[in-house]
Image: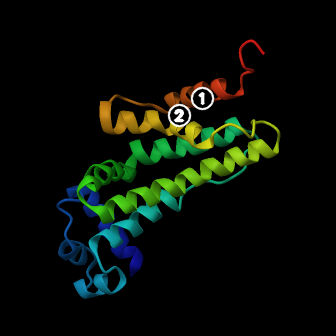
Amino acid sequence: MDQKILDATLARLIKVGYARLRVDDIAADARVAKTTLYRRWPSKDMLVAQVMRRLYTDRVATVDHGSLRADLLALLRETYQLLFEGPGRVVEDLVRESAASRELAAVVRSTTAARRRAFHQAMNRAVARGELDPAVDHDVIIDMLVGPLWTRLLVSDARMTEDDVEAIVDAALNGILRAPAGG
């Protein structure tokens, strides 16, 4: 039953967006009583949080591909697919709406924090392999990697392709793996 409710919630999010999302409509779509939803998820934000965990966080690939470049490409491609293709597009709406809702802002923060942990794991493996200098600031690198995706999604609305993902990873790696100038 939970999956039916979560599927109905995601479908509604895609169709009407967060602002117009109503628990009554979700209950009708899932063919359950509204009280059933509230027993499991006491608020709309908690329900949306669960949908986001399943859609965006639970899918994080933490597979070791053998190199930092391969790991980062896999993670950034997955992030690209979630943000720019299919149902993951609801993330854009939720980020925009989070400015008006502290609960929703917490959902967005926890969702992005979980995804950032996967990037940290990839970089920690690279440090252990001797591939990455331990002094490199992982958070700055993650910002360099995901920043262009968020900028295009939320600010410029510029087109992005999967080829751009590879260019982003290579640009970031060229900046951190190259020997310092003059040394």
Q: Nearer the viewer, residue 136 or 76?
A: 136
Please give left or right for residue 121 compared with residue 54 in the image. right
Residue 8 appears at what percent x and percent y?
A: 30, 69
- Asked if labels 2 and 1 touch by Cβ distance under 8 angstroms, the answer is yes
Residue under the image location 34 percent in, 75 percent down: 5
Q: Using the image, tell me which numbered label, if any, was put on residue 98.
A: none
Residue 15 appears at what percent x and percent y?
A: 23, 56
Please give left or right for residue 142 compared with residue 149 in the image. right
Please report whichever mark, 1 or 2, sits nearer to the chain's N-terminal start: 2
Q: Nearer the viewer, residue 128 or 7?
A: 128
Element carrying mark 2: helix
Element carrying mark 1: helix
Query: Compared to 5, does 130 lie above or below?
Result: above
Q: Using the image, tell me which numbered label, if any, was put on residue 144.
A: 2
Residue 59 appears at what percent x and percent y?
A: 54, 58
Please give left or right for residue 154 compared with residue 65 in the image. left
Give the colour scheme of this rendering. Answer: rainbow
Query: Compared to 68, does 92 lie above or below?
Result: below
Marks 1/2: CA–CA distance: 6 Å
Amino acid type shown at disc 1: Ala
Around disc 2, counting alpha carbons within 10 Å, would you say few (fewer than 14), some (14 to 19), or many (20 or more)? some
Q: Nearer the viewer, residue 144 or 23?
A: 144
Residue under the image location 28 percent in, 51 percent down: 93
Residue 61 appears at what percent x and percent y?
A: 61, 53
Please give left or right for residue 30 compared with residue 49 in the image. left
Q: Nearer the viewer, residue 12 or 111?
A: 111
Q: Using the image, tell me which numbered label, if any, was put on residue 172.
A: 1
Amino acid type shown at disc 2: Met
Report the quarter where the C terminus lies.
top right
Around disc 1, counting alpha carbons within 10 Å, would you say few (fewer than 14), some (14 to 19), or many (20 or more)? some
